[in-house]
Amino acid sequence: MKIYEIGTGYTPIPAQMGAATEIVVEELTRSLRRNGESAEIIDIKAAHRQNTLLPIIEVRVPGVFTKTDVSLGIMHKLKRVFYSISLAMKLKTILKQTDEQVALHFHNQYNLFFFLKLVSKKLRSRAIVGYTVHSYIWGTKWDEIEKTVKKKYFQEIYCVQKADAVFVLNDITIDHFVNRLGVGREQIHKILNGVNVERYTPLAEKNVFAFKKACGFAGERIIFQVGSVCPRKNQLGSIRMLSRYLREHTDVVYMYAGGIIDAAYQDSIKRFAAENGIIDQIKYVGELSPGEQLNQYYNMADCCVFTSTLESFGLVIIEAIASGTPVIVWSNLMFPLDGGYAMYHNTDEFVSLVDHFLQSGKTRSSVSEEIFTNYSWDSVASMYSNVFKEYIK
């Protein structure tokens, strides 16, 4: 069996930024191959792709679309369309030429939608078509999302109804698909994302201190949040809850990292910090590279906070856990991990947990057995390949 992991076209693989789906595709392919499976990536053509030993089949798009567009505006949508059409043609050629069993693993609604529309049913029958749902929209109650998904996610609805195998990251998505969209329960498989336990790991205390000193934070205690800068990630919400605490503890810094999706939202963060006298304690460190650099920041932090209003699965939570850093998560998220993080329900609980972790100090520990066994990418990749093999049988 040959498994093709299909990049979304958002940013080239390996991801040079915290693009979660591209990280998933990269890590899955690496682990599939390490597990002895035949696996390749199909991805957008990139003039300056980072070095990688992973085999990548490139899909050409017009030069104007080769630059990553983090604004998610009209150019981003056009890029997705052009890439998806070119991708469908590439996959048509692959299916015509192949003599072996093939699994096509999609991770983006545009990509699969155009494939289903542009490639004949007869040709598609030569492959097992799998689709992993990464969209955060499905992670809350149906009456809160019904109008949005029918208007903006009609492509994804079509994809999950047509795919052979649908992979989801949480139970509430299963409920929506089965009871609201009529997807067969036997088609749906819950497989969580994983973490690279070699990249994200506790560092020696002396190395952590040296990094803090080099960054100019040797004397500060650090609260860290990772995610695109936008209302959904809720950095401003974190700062609002922490504002009084920060004024009372001038040696504490709230640090956040991620691409700026909403410039007006970033301005509102700066304005709130200035108006509340905490501007010097709010530190934006930009877009961090996945892997070594991000792991250093996780290790430098005394605790990580995750206050997103809506998520399907927070990769950064499991990365922080693997790095040995305490994580605080809002209870509104139906997060599927069994443990390894603290949960808050209101502002008082949030501040109390932050204070607990900052005052108690952090003791570095090795990656827990649960993380290594259940959430390593090798384990996750094995779950995917086993499902594809069952379909081929």
Image: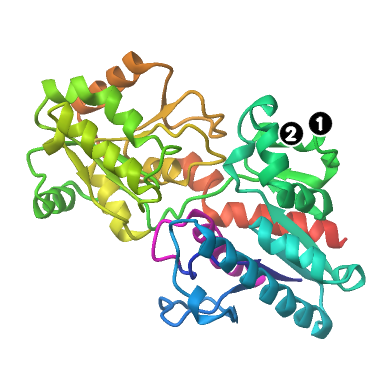
Which residue lies at the image location 80% right of the left edge and 33% below the top edge? Answer: 180
Image coords of residue 362 (percent x, y): 23, 33
Report helix, strand or loop for mark 2: helix
Q: Is residue 91 left or right of residue 208?
A: right
Quadrant location of the N terminus in the rendered image: bottom right
Pointer 2 local density, CA inside 10 Å: few below 14, some 14–19, many at least 20: some
Report helix, strand or loop for mark 1: helix
Image coords of residue 278 (percent x, y): 14, 31
* Cβ atoms under marks 2 and 1 closer than 8 Å: yes
- Among all residues in the image, which is located at the extreme right? 122
Kindly report the distance in space between the C-alpha atoms of the residues bearing marks 2 and 1: 6 Å
Image coords of residue 260 (percent x, y): 35, 51
Residue 179 counted in the magenta span: no
Residue 25 counted in the magenta span: yes
Label 1 sits on what residue type? Asn
Front-most of 213 and 137?
137
Quadrant location of the C terminus in the rendered image: bottom right
Q: Quadrant of residue 140?
A: top right
Label 2 sits on what residue type? His
Q: Which residue is mark 2?
A: 176
Which residue lies at the image location 53% right of the left edge and 34% below the top edge? Answer: 337
The kind of secondary structure the magenta stretch mainly shows is helix
Q: Which residues are magenta?
A: 15-39
Q: Which mark is residue 179?
A: 1
**Image height of 345 relative to 319, above or below:** above
Q: Quadrant of residue 62?
A: bottom right
- Among all residues in the image, which is located at the extreme bottom? 97
Q: Is residue 231 left or right of residue 381?
A: left
